[in-house]
Image: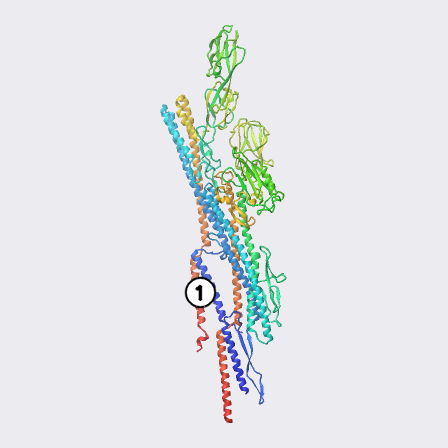
Amino acid sequence: MPYRVTSQTTLALNMQALQRQQKSLQELQQQISSGQKIQKPSDDPLLLRSLLIKQDEQARLKSHVRSVEQARLQLEQANTDLRNAHQLFVKAQQLALQGVQATEQSDRAALAGEVDGLLNQLYRLTNNSSSEGTLFGGAALNRTPFVPDSFGTYQYVGGTEATRIIFGDATGQTTLDPGNELFTPASRGPTQIEGTTGAVAGTGTDTATGLRSLLVEHTGTTILGASGVVSGASSAQDTLLGNHALTITDTSGTGAFGTISLAGSSVVSFTSSDTNLRLVGPGGEVVHLDLSNVTAGFSGTVTVQGAGRASIDGGLTFAPIGFSANEVLTDSRDQSTVNVDSSGIRRAGIDRVELTQTANAFEALKLLRDDLLTGGDVSSNVHAERINRRLTDVVRIQDHLLEHVGTQSVRLENLDLLQSYFEDAASEAEIQLTESGAADIPSAVLKLQETQLFYQYTLSSFARLYESSFLNFLQ
Amino acid sequence: MQGYDIGISALRAHQQVLTTAGQNIVNSATPGYHRQRVNLVARRSFQSSGLLIGSGVDAAQLQRLRDVAVEQALLTTGSSAAAASTRSSLASQVEALFTPGTGSVHQRLTDFFNRLEDLSNAPANPTARRAFLDAANNLAQSSNGIANQLRQLQDSVWLSLEEGVDQVNSLMERIGEVDRQISIARTQGDIPNTLLDNRDQLLSELSSWVNVAVDEGASPPQPYQFANITQARGQVLQLRSVRMGEDTAGIVLEPHGESIEIASGKLHELLQQFQQELPGIRDRFAELAGTLMTEVNRIHATGMPAGAGFDSQMSANAVDNANNPLAGQLADAVQAGNLNVTITNTSTGVRSTRRLAIDPAVDSLDDVASQLDALNGVAAFLDPQGRLSIAAEPGFAFDFAGRLDTAPTPVSWSGTATITIGGAYLGNANDEWTYAIVGTGTVGVTSGLQLEVRNASGDLLAVRNIGQGYEPGTELDPIDGTALTISEGTVVGGDTMSSLVTSQPDETGLLAGLGLNTLFVGNSSTGYGIRRDLWDNPALIAISRTGETGDAAVAEQLLSLRTSRIAASGTLTPVEELASITAQAGLEAASAQVEDQFLADQKTQLAAQQQSVSGVNADEELVLIIEAQRSFQAAARYLTSLSEALDELLNLVR
C-alpha cells in the first residue's frame, strides 16, 4: 500500500514544526533581549558550571577591590596623621635647638609653651579615628588608645595586635599597626643617673621608661671602731650613706680636743664640748657627731657607716640600700624597674634617672617641655646636655615615625598593586564571562530571521496545502 | 425478476459505501478512529438458461483498516514517550529551582561570602554586621526554599502517582467493560468496530501510564499485559499506590498487595522520580547546605563577640536522652576529642583554658555538663528538654576560642619572677608546652639565664635568653605566634611551668552539634535560620579570637571556607559544588528534553504510519463517495432500464 497522507497527519506534523520553531524563536528572542547565551541550566550545563564558578570568582575579586579601597582609605588617613605627627616632631626639633641657644628663662618658657601645644596636638592626633574605628588602637577599634597616666603623659591602652585586610585566602596583609609600636619606640640606651648620691646604673636591664627620680634617704649612722665618737644629736639629718673614713687625732692626749676629718675632707678642730658637730665630707655628705667622749690619746681612722633606703616612685615605696653592684628598684605605679649600682652611694639626695632612648613620643615632648621650663634650675652646661638628650629623643621619635610612614607608604603601594591586580583579574573574568556567556547577538539575530522565515514558510505551506481540496472541484 | 435483485443489491451496497464514507469523513478528526471500508463482493452466480449469471453485489464486510504491528509499536513508543515527557517536565521544574539569576541560591552564596569579607575588614561596623546577617539569612532561606520546593515537588509527584493509579484503574475498568461489549457483539455476529476503536483508544491512553502489550492478531484473543501483570479479556484488575517511606513508594495489585513492576509510562517515571531522581538531587543539595552550615557553625562556635567572653550560653539543640552516650543523638556528628573552654576572671583579666576530653561513644550530655560544671568559674546544667546551659559565675566569663592562658601553670616553681603569655598561637596542632628555666639568678641581670620551651613530646621548640640583656617585662621573640614575657625577679634552674596551646578549640564538633554559639540553627529536616539572639543583636556575631573589636581572626577562618574543598566529600568548594548541582539539574533536563523530543518524533512517525493505514483522507473519501454515487446512479439507471424493459414487455401483453 502506498504511503497515505491524511489531513490529521499533516496537521500534527505542521503543529509540531510550528511549536519547535516558536520555541526556537522564543529562545533566540530571550538571548537577544537578555544578552545571555544561557537562560537556563539545560541550555549548556557544562558551560553554565564554569560560568557560575567564574561569576563567583568575579564577585569575589570585586569584593576584594572593595575591601582594598576601604583599607586604603583608613591607611591613607592613618598615614596622613602619622606624617602630621612627624611634622610635630620636626617642629619640636626646631624648638629644642632654639632651647639650647636660649639664654633667658622667659624665652625657654615660651618655647616650653609651644612644646606643650605640640603635646596636646599629638594626643588628639594619636586618638584619631575613621568610620571603622580608631586608627592607632590596633585591633581595639572602639577603645581610645592613649589615655593620661600617672606620670603626666599618656599611656597606651589600645590593642596589641595590628589590623589586617582579609581576603580569606592567606593573602591578607597588615594595615594599621597598634599605636604602641608607632609612638612607643623601644631602643633602650644606657641608663643615666644624674645627681649627687653616687648611684650609677646597675648591670641589669631596666624596664622603666622616660625620666624617673631616684630618692635616696638616710636612715641611720653607725660609727665603728673604738674612737669613742658617736652620732650627734642631729644625726637624723645626716645625709652620709655607705662607709666613710673618719680620721681623728687627739692632740690633747686626753680627749679634750683634737682634729677630725671626714673622708679626706678638710680637717676640723674639736673639743670635748662638741656633742653635735656637723661634719661635711668631700661629696657634700653630712654627719653629726658627738665628740664628748673621744678616747684619750686616740689618733687613727674609723669607719662611719650610713644606712639608707631608695625609692624610684617618689617615696611611695622604698627599698633598703644594699650598696651592691645591682639593686632592682620597682616603681609601684607601673611595676617598672630600674637597676641601680648602689655600691657608690655616698649621700642622700634625689637623682635624676634618665632611661635613655626609652621615652615614647609623649614622654619625649613632655621631657623637652619640662627641661625647657627647668633650665634655670641647673647650670647652663647641664641644661644644654639635657636639651641635647631631648633633641636626641625627638630625632629618634622623628626617625621612628618616618620609618613607619615609609612602612605605611609601602603598604599603601602594596594595596594599590593589590587593587590593580584584583581589578585586572575581575576585568579578565568579566571578559571571559562575556566571551563565554554572552549571546552572539548578530548570529542570534540572523538565526532569528532565518527561523522566522521558516516559520512563515511553514504557515504559508500549511495554508497552501489546505487551499486545495477536492471539495473545491465539486460543483 | 433476478435483475431487480441485482439492482437493489447494488443500491444497497453502494448506499453502505456512501454511509461508510460519510462516517469516515465526520470522524476524520476523532482520536482513535480507524477508517472503515465496505468490502463489496459479487453475489454467487446462478444457473439460468444454461448460463451462470451473477446475482448482484453484497457489502460483505465493513473492514476496519489498521496495521497491528504499527499499532503495537505505537503503544510501546507512546508509553516511553509519556514517561519521557513526565521526566522532562519534572526535570525542567527542578532545573528552574537552580536557574541562576537575581535572588538565586548562587547569588545568595556569593553574597554570603562577600558580606563576610566586608565584615572581616570592618568588624566594628554595625552596618557590616547587619548586612552579613541579612546575607546569611538569605542564604539559609534560599537553601530552605530549594529544599522545600524539592520536597513539594516530590509530594506532587506522589499525588500524580496516586491520580495516575486511579486513572489506570478507571481505564482498566473501562477496557474490561468494552471488552465485554465486544464479546457480546461478536456473539451476536455484529462487527464492533466502534467498540474496538474505543478499546484501542483506551489502551493507548493506558499505555501512557504503564507499559501495555496486546496481541490483537491472535485468535483466540490473548490476555493483556499491563506492566508485569496479565489481565484476561473481560477481567478487571485494580492497582493501589503505596508510600512506604519518605522516598520509598510502590504500586501493588489489589486486593492482596502483590508488588508490580512497571517498565515504562508515566507511572514508571513518576516512581523513578519519586524514589531516585528527586531524592538524589535533594540529598545532594542538602548535603552541600548541611556541610556549609555545619562548617560555618563549627568555626563560629569557637569565636567570640567583642568583650571578655560569654555570661551564658544555651544549646539550641537537645538530645533525646541526656544520660545516654551522645553518639547519634545530634544531627551533626560528634567525634572523640578535646573541647577547650577558656575562663576569664573579668576583674583581673586572668585567663585559663581547660581541655575536656569527650568521647561520644561513652560520654553523655550529662557527663559533659558535669565536666563543665567542675571548672572553676562556670556552672553547667541540663534543662528537662535535654538542652545544655552554661553560665559564668559572677566575675567570670567563658568562651570556646581556645585562647592562650594569660600565665602558664607552675609545675615546680620557686623563683619570684613570673611568666605571662601573649600573642596568639599560630601552630597547626593542639599541644601542651612546658617552660623550663636553665640557670639560676635574676631575670635581666644574671648572665646565662635561659627559658626552654618544649612541646608535649619533649621536642625543644625554642630557647630564649632571659638573663642579662633581656629587659624584664618585654616580649621574647614569639614562638608560633605565642609571645612570652618574664617579669623581673628570680628564677631557679629546673623550675617549670606549662600551658596549653590550641589550634582547634573544638575537636569534637560538639558545640556545632549542640548549637552552642553557632551562627545558623536548624538542620536539613527543619530548615536553617539565623540564631535569634544574633538576629536581634548583631554585636554577638562571634568573629573574633581575642574579643577585641578589630580582631576578625574567626571571620578570616569563615571566609576561607569559600575556597576550601569542604563539599562533595572534600573534593569541591561550596561554589563549585553548587555549580555542579546546577549543571547536574541542567544535564538531566537537557537529557530529558532530548529523549522527550526523540520519542515524540518517533511517536509522530509511528502515528503518521498508523494514520497512513487508519487515518481518514477526506479527498479520498470524496472520491469514494463520487464513485459510490456514480455506482448508485448506475444501479438506479439499471433498475429504470430494467423497469422500462419490463414495461415494454407488459405493453406487448396489453
Q: Observer-nearest residue: B12 or A359? A: B12
Q: Specify whether residue B70 is in view.
A: no
Image quarter (top left, top right, bottom left or bottom right) of the C terminus of chain A = bottom left
Q: Can see residue A130?
A: yes
Residue B493 image position (x, y, % from top left): 59, 28
User: Observer-nearest residue: A308 or B427?
Assistant: A308
| Residue B18 image point, x, y percent | 50, 78
Residue that badge 1 annotates: A455
Q: Amino acid at mark 1?
A: Tyr
In this view, the residue in front, B3 or B374, is: B374
Residue A38 lies, with reference to residue A136, above or below; the image says below
Residue B128, image x, y percentages: 46, 44
The residue at 51%/89% (across/down) is B646
> Closer to the camera, B475 or B9?
B9
- SS for dot 1: helix
Give the x, y percent position of residue A107: 36, 25
Q: Quadrant of the N terminus of chain A?
A: bottom right
